[in-house]
Amino acid sequence: MFRRKHSHNHQENDSSQDAKVNELRTAIGPISGRSLQYCTDACLRRYLEARNWNVDKSKKMLEETLKWRSNYKPEEIRWHEVANEGETGKVYRANFHDRQGRTVLILRPGMQNTSSQDSQIRHLVYLIENAILNLPEGQEQMSWLIDFTGWSLNTNVPIKTARDSANILQNHYPERLAVAFLYNPPRIFEAFWKVVKYFLDPKTFQKVKFVYPKNKDSVELMSSYFDVENLPTEFGGKAKLQYDHEEFSRLMAQDDVKAARVWGFDNKLHHPPQSSFPLLVF
């Protein structure tokens, strides 16, 4: 009886959510091109989820994203345009998934190597798009692992960059982040965090987890998300973390071709000039 009742309620919930998706689609009106391609049912569900299934609020949020995407064109960013930001491996897509099959982004703020805030954000947006491109079928979210090795106030990103990055993630990639593990942040980071946390909406804030190697509960929480055999030693695992910029650049170049195919534009227009290739070699 309990099982049948649960199934009935589940079906009712799905039906209600489907109705909300249809309502939101009707509310945003006729769209075309990449906006139409972007607004899948799964996409509309994410925006509804982010705004507690309020259609009006979801509509406003989605319209702001469509405007942002039309101007910023995140799907058109190519690796050769942001490769200099990635030379130290401060943000990159891991070669493993979490236990739920989600794409993993590794962030190493201590490896900051540039001062251009616009370029830093563009690099992050590229890698968020790339993480989404590489999600397994049926999976909507990614996980972040943040390694504070070498982090100091000197390598810290400015508050404005942190705020702008948080706003882009929350407002234009709703429900894409499953969890963000901040691994062993130094005590001095607490002052920075006190400011940054005010930029986060409650849902995003709940997804941020602090992990300290000597705290059994936080370590166990992390191991529930990741296989210790895949997890780099920097995060308490057994795998060796080694970022190879040249190899990662080759991988991103392949993904750029895939992205061009997915979005339906000519990738030939986005090849880097030959003179830029030596920058990828160490």
Image (tube, grey):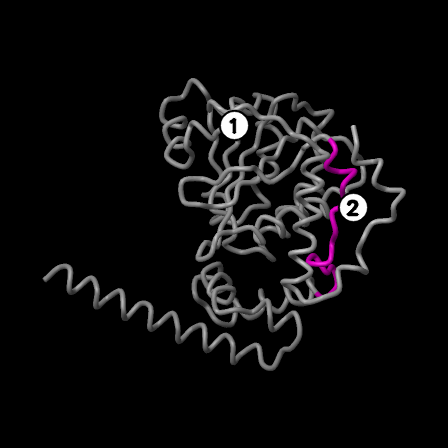
Circle 1 crowding by C-alpha within 10 Å: few under 14, some 14–19, many from 20: many
How far apart are the two marked residues, 1 and 2, measured between alpha carbons?
30 Å
Specify few, some or many for label 2: CA neighbours under 10 Å numbering under 14, 14-19, or 20 or more: many
Disc nearer the start of the sequence (1/2): 2
Q: Residue at x 86, y 42 (%)?
A: 276
Of helix, strand and loop, which one carries label 2?
Answer: helix
* Magenta stretch encompasses residue 72: yes
When the figure is inspected, residue 259 is found, relative to residue 202, above or below; the finding is: below
Horizontal side of 68 relative to 7 (left or right) equals right
Quadrant location of the N terminus?
bottom left
Depicted 187 relative to depicted 142: above or below: above
Asked if the magenta segment contains residue 153, the reply would be no
Residue drawn at x 50%, y 34% as measured from the top left? 181
In percent of width and height, residue 237 lies at 46, 24
Q: Report the side of 49 relative to 81 (left or right).
A: left
**Residue type pointed to by label 1:** Tyr
Please indicate whether residue 138 sits to the left or right of residue 91 in the image: left
Q: Which mark is residue 183?
A: 1
Q: Which mark is residue 228?
A: none
Find disc 2 in the rendering and name its residue.
80
Residue lying furthest right in this view?
Answer: 275
* Magenta stretch, residue numbers: 70-87
Question: What residue is shown at x 67% (from left), y 26% (from top)?
Answer: 110
Quarter of the C terminus within the rendering: top right
184 or 231, which is in the foreground? Answer: 231
Question: Total of numbered circles in the picture?
Answer: 2
Q: Quadrant of residue 206?
A: top left
Give the vertical position of 7 relative to 190 (above or below): below
Report the front residue among 92 and 179: 92
Furthest residue in direction top, as rendered: 214
Residue 137: x and y in percent read: 46, 56
Q: Tell me which secondary structure the magenta stretch mostly adopts.
A: helix
